[in-house]
Image (cartoon, rainbow, N blue to C red):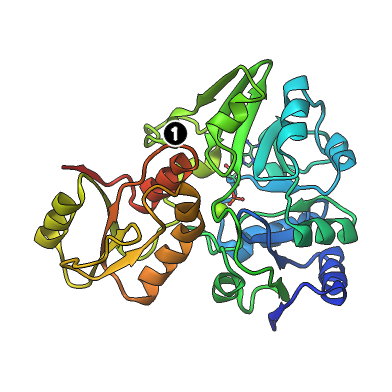
Amino acid sequence: MKTILAPPTEENLARAAQFIKQGLLVGMPTETVYGLAADAGNEQAVKAIFTAKGRPQDNPLIVHISSLDMLEKLAESVPEIARRLAEAFWPGPLTMILPKSQQVSDTVTAGIGTVAVRFPSHPVAQRLIALSGCPIAAPSANLSGSPSPTRAEHVLRDMVGRIPMILDGGECQVGLESTVVSVSEDLVRVLRPGGITVDDLLTVASRVEVDGAVLHQLEAGRVAASPGMKYKHYAPKAQVTIVEGNLSAFYQYAAAHQESVTYCMVFDGEERNAPLPCITYGSKDDQRAQARELFDCLRRLDDLGAQTVFVRSPSREGVGLAVYNRLLRAAAFRVVSL
Ligand code: AMP
Ligand code: MG
């Protein structure tokens, strides 16, 4: 199959919506990461998502909407707290887990009784959903296990020959996947951290808890609240280690443990006078910049042929919690404290 990389003109959007209506997949820019979009109501199209990505069947998809009317059809009921969260953070990088309606197929939800719903803020995503006229199931548009795509070229790399079209919406503004929450009465539980932070959620909910799987490896036999959290994820080909400590201790450790092709992933400015080759991922105090750059850095490390990577540990404040969560998985939970 030929894959077209196209700017999101009205003509190309109409063409993309036509592909969706035919049950094909389209690379769609959103404010979080690029999505692999399909008609959520078309069983064959949804199955094709799993095939194109090589995604495990038990990892459910997020359904994207472009109006609140679409929400009512997907969710069996919408609790009061979810309505308040929607009002505060939609459109935006927040996904809510809600009881699913009969309309939503078990293929979309991997057989779970709930459905994950998000209303993206990216104008191209909104327009594509509206033109397609249906809720859109869309996971990140990468091959399963590799870093999520934050630029159209990343999607092209992973999906060339597998999908007919990618809409090029430039670089994603958040750069990490959405915050995923489950809700019950006044409690909001963060299953996956993202661009909407715990502090943001606290402006609406009186209680916010972070699920244990966000920062810890799931024990064998335990069921994941968010199935995606159990997989090794976001990983470049290199062995990645997060190293906690001050900069000089970090470089000392990296120099002592370097192997054939070793890189350090450090904050902006820290690459000066470094004893090893470095790439940078945003300034130390700017968690949003780190989030934006993280996945592109992980992909560049692959291009550089890195085999061993040592990463400066980010702060877990604000969006930093999401950055740290993704790095932990890229590192398969290898963390060294100096
Ligand atoms: P991705 O589409 O690659 O961003 O992954 C979607 C994430 O949402 C995965 O981590 C899933 O585990 C999570 N998710 C989707 N649907 C549900 C659901 N019904 N319950 C819990 N987590 C979900
Ligand atoms: Mg993904």
Q: Please provide percent x and percent y for residue 188.
A: 61, 24
Q: Is residue 337 left or right of residue 223?
A: left
Q: Please provide percent x and percent y for residue 4.
A: 71, 81
Residue at the (61%, 53%) spot, across then down: 32
Residue at the (77%, 62%) spot, across then down: 124
- As helix, strand or loop, the secondary structure at mark 1 comes to helix
Question: As shown in the figure, which amino acid type bears the numbered disc 1?
Answer: Ala
Asked whether residue 265 is in view, the answer is: yes
Residue at the (15%, 67%) spot, across then down: 275
> Quadrant location of residue 222?
top left
Q: Please provide percent x and percent y for residue 204.
A: 67, 24
Please name the residue that numbered disc 1 is placed on. 213
Quarter of the displayed picture in which ligand 1 can be seen:
top right
Asked whether residue 147 is in view, the answer is: no
> Quadrant location of residue 298?
bottom left
Using the image, determine if residue 228 lies above or below residue 207.
below
